[in-house]
Amino acid sequence: MGSWQVQDAKARFSEFLDATIKKGPQVVTRRGVETAVMVPIKEWKRLQKAAQPGLKALLLAPETRFENLVGERHKLRRRPVLEFE
């Protein structure tokens, strides 16, 4: 994965875009801190398809929203009762 400083990505955007298309995701840094990633559209669509629905989609969905919010609980083992004399 390539890394570009923000000023280089801006100044050489066509090259930046070509690198993304040919080599895959490219990281953009600002003051040495990774800030963003540019990905090819195919990869973006794959990631979007694989992602679970967001909160907005869940809230606007016509089906019941509150089933399976909490996973099934496992059976709890009780500690043996200690007897004192």
Image (cartoon, rainbow, N blue to C red):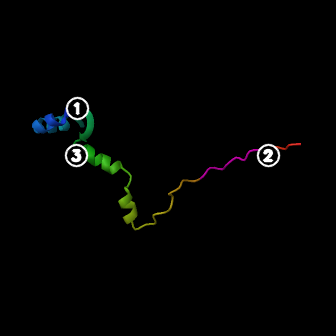
Left or right? Give the position of 44 relative to 15.
right
Q: Are marks 1 and 3 in contact (CB under 8 Å)?
A: no
**Mark 1 or mark 3, whichever is nearer to me:** 1
What residue would you read off at disc 2?
81
Residue type highlighted by circle 2: Val
Instruction: Tell me which label, 1 or 3, sits earlier in the chain.
Output: 1
Of residues 28 and 70, which is closer to you in this image? 28
Left or right? Give the position of 77 relative to 13.
right
Residue type highlighted by circle 1: Ser
Q: Can residue 79 be found in the magenta stretch?
A: yes
Q: Is residue 12 above or below residue 42?
A: above
Q: Which residues are magenta?
A: 73-80
Left or right? Give the position of 66 relative to 72.
left
What residue would you read off at disc 1?
3
Instruction: Tell me which label, 3 or 2, sits earlier in the chain.
Output: 3
Q: Position of residue 75 (x, y in %)?
A: 66, 50
Q: Position of residue 79 (x, y in %)?
A: 74, 45
- Within 10 angstroms of label 1, few (less than 14), some, or many (20 or more) residues? some
Residue type highlighted by circle 3: Ile
* x 36%, y 60%: residue: 57
**Mark 3 or mark 2, whichever is nearer to me:** 2
Q: Is residue 58 above or below residue 77?
A: below
Of residues 19 and 28, which is closer to you in this image? 28
Judged from the image, the secondary structure of the residue bearing numbered disc 3 is helix
Quarter of the view holding residue 17: top left
What residue would you read off at disc 3?
41
Judged from the image, the secondary structure of the residue bearing numbered disc 2 is loop
